[in-house]
Image: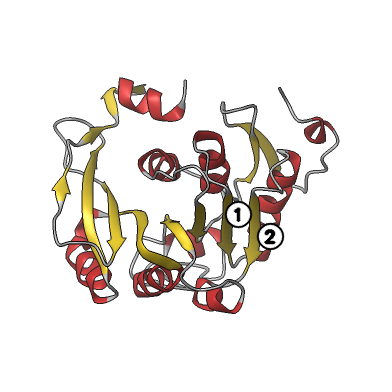
């Protein structure tokens, strides 16, 4: 059932409301600032949280991962950290309009400052869909929301790993999605901060194409044992998702 708050919500110029097809939840997006992509949906399907657990989402964007995980799990509490003020504001309004303020809190801050806002070592799960690109090469406007979402301008992967390790309880789980070409660096950085890679799933656009995304779970102070899972194939043919992708989206 649609929350009545959506019928009265005021949108800023360029914003729209999209249906998430989960529990009647919707989300505010802005093509000029931030719209979630398939990577966020895949991460929300790969990560898991148990009843009563606390989840921290770093680089939260418009709140897509906390909102989707609120629909899919029985986690007690979600916190999203997003530095860009306008994007964090979209997330806060979506959370309120979905009636999720008792479960989801959005904080506008750089992830490097997370410890100023939250207690260390209390989260069961950390999720992050971080900027993938290493530097600012080719960026016309480094201050644009899209550039910040895609490039390591405000934070880098070491900031993600350091913050995740600080905020997780021992044995807590960190879930990320990233690019395969950075796997060596990712593994080195995770283990540097005591996050042991436990599961890995490569994502291929087609069955005969190289992977272009990788999903990872790393556990804080976990044993050194990695399971490489069956790969995920996105498309059966052009514009036709595989059954597994339809299941993740909830169609």
Way the structure is coloured: secondary structure
Question: What percent of the width, then of the height, locates residue 5?
Answer: 81, 36
Q: Is residue 71 above or below residue 168?
A: above
Q: Residue at x 76, y 47 (%)?
A: 13
Res 9 seen here: yes
Q: Is residue 212 above or below residue 236?
A: below
Where residue 206 sits, quadrant-wise, is top left
The mark nearer the N terminus, 1 or 2, is 1
Q: Residue at x 29, y 75 (%)?
A: 193
Q: Is residue 136 above or below residue 73?
A: below
Q: Residue at x 56, y 26 (%)?
A: 21
Tell me if label 1 and label 2 are in contact, CB under 8 Å: yes
Task: Tell me: 223 left or right of 157.
Answer: left
Local crowd size for mark 2, using a 10 Å CA cut-off: few (<14), some (14–19), many (≥20):
some
Question: Which label lies toward us, 1 or 2?
Answer: 2
Query: Where is mark 2, residue-wise?
Result: 86
Where residue 115 sits, quadrant-wise, is bottom right
Task: Tell me: 242 left or right of 250.
Answer: left
Q: Nearer the viewer, residue 136 or 140?
A: 136
Where disc 2 sits, the SS reads helix
Query: Where is mark 1, residue-wise?
Result: 33
């Amino acid at each position: 059932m649609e929350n009545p708050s959506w019928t009265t919500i005021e949108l800023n110029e360029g914003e729209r409301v999209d249906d998430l097809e989960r529990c009647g939840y919707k989300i505010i997006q802005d093509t000029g600032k931030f719209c979630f992509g398939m990577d966020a949906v895949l991460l929300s399907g790969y990560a898991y949280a148990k009843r009563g657990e606390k989840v921290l989402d770093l680089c939260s964007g418009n709140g897509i991962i906390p909102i989707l995980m609120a629909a899919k799990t029985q986690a007690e509490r979600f916190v999203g950290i997003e530095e860009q003020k306008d994007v964090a504001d979209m997330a806060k309004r979506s959370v309120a309009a979905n009636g999720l303020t008792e479960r989801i809190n959005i904080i506008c801050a750089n992830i490097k400052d997370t410890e100023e806002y939250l207690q260390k070592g209390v989260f069961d799960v950390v999720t992050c869909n971080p900027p993938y690109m290493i530097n600012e090469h080719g960026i016309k406007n480094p201050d644009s929301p899209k550039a910040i979402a895609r490039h390591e301008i405000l934070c880098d992967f070491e900031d993600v790993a350091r913050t995740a390790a600080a905020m997780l309880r021992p044995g807590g789980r960190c879930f990320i999605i990233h690019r395969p070409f950075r796997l060596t660096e990712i593994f080195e950085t995770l283990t540097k901060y005591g996050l042991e890679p436990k599961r890995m799933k490569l994502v291929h656009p087609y069955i005969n194409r190289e992977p272009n995304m990788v999903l990872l779970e790393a556990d804080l102070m976990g044993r050194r044992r990695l399971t490489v899972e069956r790969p995920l194939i996105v498309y059966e043919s052009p514009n036709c998702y595989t059954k597994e992708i339809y299941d993740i989206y909830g169609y």
